[in-house]
């Protein structure tokens, strides 16, 4: 990546030489050019919200407030706030490969307390408008009259509703001209007398009728979790066809989201040990809150990370999975394939992977290739539930 201060070598996480998706885009480059041209000060508290793979904080840290590339810093030059464990790991690796001293960038999650004062706020517009709302509301009290606020995104990511959200929470908002299909957002920080709206997140609702014993059960969703204000139809279909566990099985809700699938298992069989795992910090918080709200009597573990990485081989009996097929704006099956391969490694002989997905995605082909088998458990015109068994 070419920045106003030099070249950076960047990669996504986990690194895959076959992956042709870059760790930055035109919106990152546009924002960095603007900061250099306008000489935005970098010696105050700089917060970068939603930096997807660490491109922005790596560039700012390598540049430094005095412009000396790689110079050691007595205090963090920037704070990154992200919902993505993968993005945070990519940031650590990108900082190291570009010679940035440890401690130069402070890494926070969307669940951590925000800095008490923000002098420069840089925002990469996320796919989820709810996540943007939640994070702007959390940061707004830390902004002051002199705070510089600049957002960035591709043109297709910035809508009227995006601009209205900035304006409602912070202040008067305008956009730049587009460059390479990217656009910047300029927003005045809230005035001292401006009343900041209350934060509606996390969102609570009860499950609808038609899913047996789960009907009326509470669900808790933090902002940014998929389909945060209602039960998505894919999960609803999956809940109708979940397998019955037998005895003290170890069950994984892989890519757990709000955790309702794993919670359903725990409620149906208190003997089961359920591991909830997701790469989203918001999702893990939602899953734990949903589990506790239902008073599930069994054993549960909540782990943020890259799927089943870190679990011992042959250590689980059942994996339940509704894999995503997007990485930010890019459509890709890389995440699903990583989930399936991780499940096969972690399953004991005879263990099962159950997957729900859109019929057109053709997951049965991948499962047969990986497991040597795939069984259709249930299907409708839109979704299928598939089962693959680990042989030997």
Image (cartoon, rainbow, N blue to C red):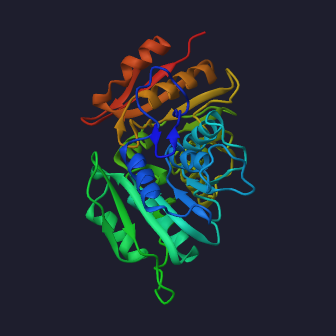
Which quarter of the image is occupied by the C terminus?
A: top right
| 379 lies left or right of 143 | left
Which residue is located at x 44 percent, y 28 percent? 334
Residue projecting furthest to the right: 74
Q: Is residue 37 visible?
A: yes
Q: Is residue 230 visible?
A: no
Nearest the eye: 291 or 296: 291
Q: Is residue 39 above or below residue 307?
A: below
Spot occupied by residue 96 in the image (x, y as percentages of width and height) = 66, 36
| 14 lies left or right of 19 | right
Which residue is located at x 69 percent, y 25 percent? 315
Nearest the eye: 265 or 345: 345
Total count of labels: 0
Spot occupied by residue 117 in the image (x, y as percentages of width and height) = 62, 72
Residue 174 occupies quadrant: bottom left
| 181 lies left or right of 270 | left
Spot occupied by residue 65 in the image (x, y as percentages of width and height) = 61, 57
Residue 288 occupies quadrant: bottom right
Which residue is located at x 36 percent, y 74 percent? 167
Residue projecting furthest to the bottom: 193
Spot occupied by residue 226 in the image (x, y as percentages of width and height) = 42, 50
Nearest the eye: 200 or 174: 174
Which residue is located at x 39 percent, y 42 percent? 25
């Amino acid at each position: 990546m070419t920045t106003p201060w030099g070249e950076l070598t960047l990669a996504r996480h986990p690194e895959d030489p076959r992956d042709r998706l870059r760790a930055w885009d035109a919106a990152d480059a546009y924002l960095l050019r603007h900061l250099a041209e306008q000489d935005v000060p970098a010696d105050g508290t700089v917060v970068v919200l939603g930096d997807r793979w660490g491109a922005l904080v790596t560039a700012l840290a390598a540049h430094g407030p005095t412009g000396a590339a790689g110079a050691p810093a007595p205090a963090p030059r920037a704070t990154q706030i992200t919902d993505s464990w993968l993005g945070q790991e990519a940031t650590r690796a990108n900082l190291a490969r570009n010679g940035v001293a440890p401690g130069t960038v402070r890494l926070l999650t969307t669940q951590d307390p925000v800095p008490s004062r923000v002098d420069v706020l840089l925002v990469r517009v996320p796919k989820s408008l709810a996540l943007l709302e939640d994070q702007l509301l959390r940061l707004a009290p830390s902004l002051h009259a002199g705070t510089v606020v600049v957002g960035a995104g591709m043109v297709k990511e910035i809508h009227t509703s995006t601009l209205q959200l900035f304006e409602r929470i912070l202040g008067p908002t305008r956009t730049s001209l587009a460059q390479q299909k990217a656009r910047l957002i300029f927003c005045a920080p809230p005035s001292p007398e401006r009343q900041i709206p209350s934060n509606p997140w996390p969102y609570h609702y009860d499950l609808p009728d038609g899913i047996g014993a789960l009907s009326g059960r509470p669900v808790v969703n933090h902002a940014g979790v998929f389909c945060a204000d209602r039960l998505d139809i894919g999960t609803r279909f999956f809940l109708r066809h979940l397998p019955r566990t037998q005895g003290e099985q170890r069950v994984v809700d892989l890519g757990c989201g709000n955790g309702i699938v794993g919670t359903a298992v725990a409620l149906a069989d208190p003997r089961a040990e359920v591991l909830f795992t997701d790469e989203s910090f918001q999702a893990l918080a939602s899953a734990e809150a949903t589990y506790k709200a239902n008073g599930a009597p069994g054993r549960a573990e909540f782990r943020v990370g890259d799927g089943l990485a870190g679990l011992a081989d042959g250590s689980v009996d059942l994996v339940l999975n509704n894999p995503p097929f997007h990485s930010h704006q890019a459509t890709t099956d890389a995440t699903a394939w990583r989930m399936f391969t991780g499940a096969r490694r972690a399953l004991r002989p005879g263990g099962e992977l159950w997957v729900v997905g859109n019929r057109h995605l053709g997951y049965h082909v991948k499962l047969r290739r990986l497991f040597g088998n795939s069984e259709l458990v249930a299907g409708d015109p839109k979704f299928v539930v598939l089962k693959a068994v680990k042989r030997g």
